[in-house]
């Protein structure tokens, strides 16, 4: 299975050139937090396997946080028209109430419950009055929690060495995303009232 999806080639490339591989992985984490449809979690087991838990976690969280900061900054600099073009009119209208976030507590709640909408939240909250420092610190801390939990789960199932367990983990991750989406929708509807 791993050969069909090219994981062995990717792992071999990253192992042969660790510094280049780390730079490519970090860059992808940044870009995937700015460009909404790019998936990140399928590469986490590769980072875990090659760099280990702590180095993989640090690079993943750093890249994700930097990308989220860039998305926030782009929203601040270019405003609503730019954000609408990035997230789409429908999602923008559904999430536009997040522009009214004023407290760090609300931002923590939004980041915890809305992890499925990580990139979208970065853009929308960029239009709010939340100071950048509070935003980036909150994003960093919540990213450490979420990514740390998934790194531990990936290790528990055997990561790349046990591809069937890894695919099972992706199924669990999908289930968590569905449950998160339902909780987010409930929060979203209650907040709009």
Image (tube, rainbow, N blue to C red):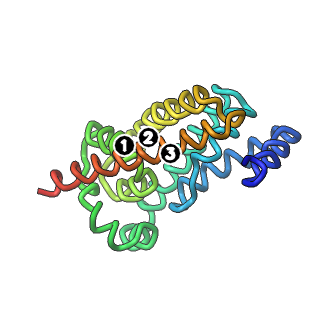
Foreground tag (3 vs 1): 3
Q: Which residue is mark 2?
A: 139
Q: Residue at x 60, y 50 (%)?
A: 30
Compared to residue 142, the image places residue 67 above or below, namely below
The total number of labels drawn is: 3
The residue singled out by tag 3 in the image is: 171
Callout 3–callout 1 Cβ contact below 8 Å: no
Front label number (1 vs 2): 1
9 or 2, which lies in front? 2
Instruction: Classify residue 176 by image quadrant.
Output: top left
Q: Position of residue 175 (x, y in %)?
A: 42, 45
Reading the chain from its start, which is encountered first: label 2 or label 3? 2
Does residue 35 lie above or below 101 as drawn?
below
Disc 1 designates what residue? 111
Instruction: Give the residue at x 73% y 31%.
Output: 51
Label 1 Cα crowd, 10 Å radius (few <14 / some 14-19 / many 20+): many
Marks 1 and 2: CB-CB under 8 Å? yes
Of badges 2 and 3, nearer the viewer stands 3
């Amino acid at each position: 299975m791993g050969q069909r999806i090219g994981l062995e080639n990717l792992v071999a490339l990253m192992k042969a050139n660790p510094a280049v591989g780390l730079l490519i992985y970090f860059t992808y984490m940044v870009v995937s937090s700015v460009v909404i449809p790019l998936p990140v979690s399928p590469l986490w087991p590769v980072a875990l396997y090659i760099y280990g838990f702590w180095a993989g976690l640090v690079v993943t969280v750093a890249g994700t946080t930097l990308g989220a900061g860039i998305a926030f900054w782009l929203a601040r600099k270019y405003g609503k028209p730019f954000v609408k073009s990035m997230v789409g009119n429908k999602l923008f209208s559904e999430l536009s109430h997040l522009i009214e976030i004023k407290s760090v507590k609300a931002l923590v709640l939004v980041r915890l419950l809305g992890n499925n909408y990580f990139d979208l939240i970065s853009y929308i909250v960029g239009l709010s009055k939340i100071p950048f420092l509070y935003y980036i610190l909150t994003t960093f801390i919540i990213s450490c929690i979420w990514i740390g939990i998934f790194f531990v789960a990936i290790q528990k199932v055997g990561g790349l060495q046990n591809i069937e367990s890894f695919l099972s983990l992706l199924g669990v991750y999908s289930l968590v995303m569905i449950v998160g989406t339902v909780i987010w929708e409930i929060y979203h509807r209650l907040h709009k009232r």
